[in-house]
Image (cartoon, rainbow, N blue to C red):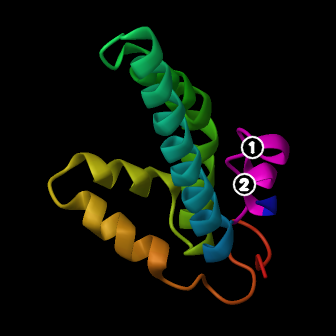
């Protein structure tokens, strides 16, 4: 949970520096857990009010908008840890580009300092 809070509170829109694999994947994990919790809460509220999924949708859209900037920032810092520019994130918009990003995010960062800062470990 500390990694999630670090990305949300300390580095909300910080695109500089580097992010370890652990920081990135813990952020993703707790973000997914939060989404599941919001879907359950939204489902219960939809059942109470009979709103056919509107409450769930509103909760998830608000959460997605709130989490967009920190998730983009941590992804770019993760690319920096691999000694790649943040512009590599745009590869997600071409076919199979998200698979390339997934592989990048699973790789170990460059040891020692690189052009984006000192080692993150």
User: In the rendered image, which quarter contains the N terminus?
Assistant: bottom right
* Structural distance between the alpha carbons of marks 2 and 1: 6 Å
Q: Position of residue 5 (x, y in %)?
A: 79, 50
The answer to whether residue 27 is above or below residue 20 is above
Q: Residues within 10 Å of mark 1 (few under 14, many from 20)?
A: some
Q: Residue drawn 75% across and 43% down?
A: 8
Q: Is residue 9 magenta?
A: yes
Residue, far front = 48
Q: Residue drawn 51% across and 23% down?
A: 59
User: Is the Cβ of the residue at disc 2 closer than 8 Å to that at disc 1?
Assistant: yes
Q: Secondary structure at mark 2?
A: helix
The answer to whether residue 36 is above or below residue 114 is above
Q: Secondary structure at mark 1?
A: helix
Depth check: give the residue in front, 45 or 72: 45
| Residue beneath disc 1 | 8
Q: Residues within 10 Å of mark 2 (few under 14, many from 20)?
A: some
Is residue 22 left or right of 107 when viewed as pictured?
right
Residue, far left = 95
Q: Position of residue 14 (x, y in %)?
A: 73, 45
Depth check: give the residue in front, 119 or 40: 40
The answer to whether residue 93 is above or below residue 119 is above
Q: Which residues are magenta?
A: 3-18
Q: Is residue 106 magenta?
A: no
Is residue 41 left or right of 118 when viewed as pictured?
left
Is residue 92 left or right of 114 when viewed as pictured?
left
User: In the rendered image, which quarter contains the C terminus?
Assistant: bottom right
| Residue beneath disc 2 | 4
Q: Residue drawn 46% across and 23% down?
A: 61
Which dot marks residue 83? none
């Amino acid at each position: 949970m500390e990694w999630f809070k670090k990305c949300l509170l300390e580095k909300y829109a910080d695109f500089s520096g580097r992010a370890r694999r652990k920081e990135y994947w813990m952020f993703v994990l707790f973000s997914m857990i939060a989404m599941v919790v919001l879907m359950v809460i939204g489902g219960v509220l939809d059942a109470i009010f009979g709103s056919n999924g509107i409450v769930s949708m509103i909760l998830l859209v608000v959460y997605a908008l709130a989490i967009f900037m920190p998730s983009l920032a941590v992804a770019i810092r993760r690319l920096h840890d691999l000694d790649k520019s943040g512009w590599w994130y745009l590869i997600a918009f071409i076919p199979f580009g998200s698979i390339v990003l997934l592989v990048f995010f699973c790789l170990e960062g460059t040891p020692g300092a690189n052009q984006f800062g000192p080692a993150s470990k």
